[in-house]
Amino acid sequence: MIREILRMGDPRLLEKARPVETFGTPELRQLAADMLDTMRAADGAGLAAPQIGVGLRVVIFGLESNPRYPQAEPVPFTILVNPALTPLSDELEEGWEGCLSVPGLRGLVPRFARLAYRGFDLDGAPVEREAAGFHARVVQHECDHLDGILYPMRIRDFTRFGYTDVLFPDADLPAD
Ligand code: NI
């Protein structure tokens, strides 16, 4: 079921989400299915449970070709429960981000260039990967949502924050 996506200003987006304690339940599967429906309907590259008002540490992400991010390399579709991130170097990379909870805007955000992440799938099986580039960026963005952090809070240079259609008038990106 497609759920309403909370927008910046809603205090629920600023809360720290709770870990999932029981895996493989119908409720957890339904949550992941709703998140997937909602992300796909909005052409998102990722979604975190707090964005649909559920304060649990669940994120989904992945893209093949995405109209919101036409230049981005593919990212494998992933459901990650109770994720943990470990940067693999101090190197930061600036890149443009948007967010379904911050429609119409893009900002240049520094993120760790390379990281390892781990967590669990819906049945509690461990997931462990290394990622770089856009993949690493998406994971960091989604996991930030679990700690109540929205990407504008990470922007260092506010001259690189603005409306998508003004920043990229020729890019033909969706407005949100
Ligand atoms: Ni977001």
Image: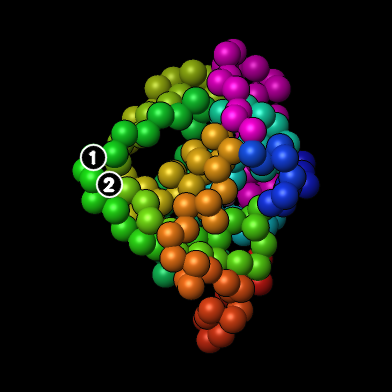
- Relative to 162, is 127 above or below? above
Look at the image and give the residue range highlighted in magenta. 15-40
Q: Is residue 42 magenta?
A: no
Residue at 56% in and 85% down: 169
Residue 145 visible, this orientation: yes
Foreground pick, 55 / 30: 55
Residue at 57% in and 13% down: 21
**Where's the N terminus, which quadrant?**
top right
Residue 128 in percent (x, y) is at 34, 30
**Where's the C terminus, which quadrant?**
bottom right
Q: Which amino acid does label 1 sit on?
A: Leu
Residue at 59% in and 38% down: 148
Residue at 56% in and 21% down: 19
Foreground pick, 120 / 94: 94
Q: Is residue 113 left or right of residue 166?
A: left
Which badge, 1 or 2, comes first in the chain's sequence?
Answer: 1
Q: In this view, does 1 lie to the left or right of 48?
A: right
* Residue at numbered disc 1: 88
Q: Is residue 114 left or right of residue 56?
A: left
* Residue at numbered disc 2: 114
Q: What element carries label 1?
A: loop
Residue 133 in percent (x, y) is at 32, 55
Q: Residue 73: which quarter of the image?
A: bottom left
